[in-house]
Image (cartoon, grey):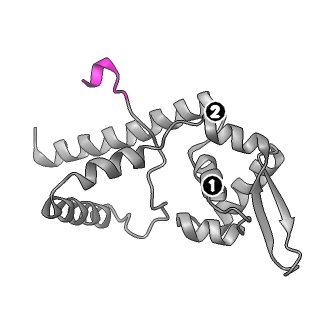
Amino acid sequence: MEKYEELLLALRKVIRATDLYSKKLNKLTGLTAPQLLILREISFAEDGITASAVAQNITLSPATVSNVIDRLEQRELITRTRSTTDRRRVELTLTEQGRERLAAAPRPLQEDFIERFHALQDWEQSQLLAAMQRIAAMMDAHQLEAAEVLEVGTYEPPESDK
């Protein structure tokens, strides 16, 4: 097998792991990965957070975040409240149902990934970062919108992939 084929195979495995986890997440919690990511971000803000701050913190476009927030509000997982001190500001908070759904959600893969990444030597971390940035550029993906965190959790590969 050519090296480029091995690299593309490894990328497909990462994509497949992401997709499998997203399906598992949706089945277990009824949430998509972006919905879970946004719920987690809202939960970190004790006094509420604006949609634009959520978008900035998770590096997704405001339009994408707004659409997801609309769906979360319709499902009564979050509430929007106009600020009493600044009427232009609309703050997002979790409802009790939103907190319960978030608590029942599995741990995101980025937490496992970060632990494993930090266990690497500094030079290995730099090498992986440079390689992935180069791959993104080679695939004309360096300018695509993406969250700073992976939107997946622990992955159990199927028997056929082991």
Q: Amino acid at mark 1?
A: Ile
Question: Is-magenta flag for residue 157?
Answer: yes
Q: Residue at x 52, y 38 (%)?
A: 22
Please determine whether, in this image, residue 91 is positioned above or below residue 113: below
| Percent of width and height locating residue 72 | 75, 49
Q: Quadrant of the C terminus?
A: top left
- Tell me where residue 9 appears, x and y as whole percent: 24, 40
| Residue that mark 2 sits on | 29
Q: Quadrant of the N terminus?
A: top left
Residue 69 location, quadrant = bottom right
Q: Is residue 51 left or right of residue 22?
A: right
* Residue situated furthest top in the rendering: 159
- Left or right of 131 in this view: 61: right
Q: Residue at x 29, y 46 (%)?
A: 11
Furthest toward the front, the residue is 46
Q: Residues within 10 Å of mark 1 (few under 14, many from 20)?
A: many
- Residue at position x 30%, y 18% in the image: 159
The residue sitting at 32% across, 62% down in the picture is 136
Q: Quadrant of residue 128?
A: bottom left
Magenta highlight range: 156-162
| Residue kind at label 2, given as amino acid type | Thr
**144 on left or right of 57:** left
- Tell me: 17 left or right of 119: right
Label 1, label 2: how many angstroms apart (C-alpha)? 14 Å
Q: Earlier in the sequence, mark 1 or mark 2?
A: 2
Local crowd at mark 2 within 10 Å, few (<14), some, or many (≥20)? some
Picture quadrant where residue 18 is located: top left
Q: Picture coordinates of residue 160 (x, y %)?
A: 29, 20
Find disc 1 in the rendering and name its residue. 38
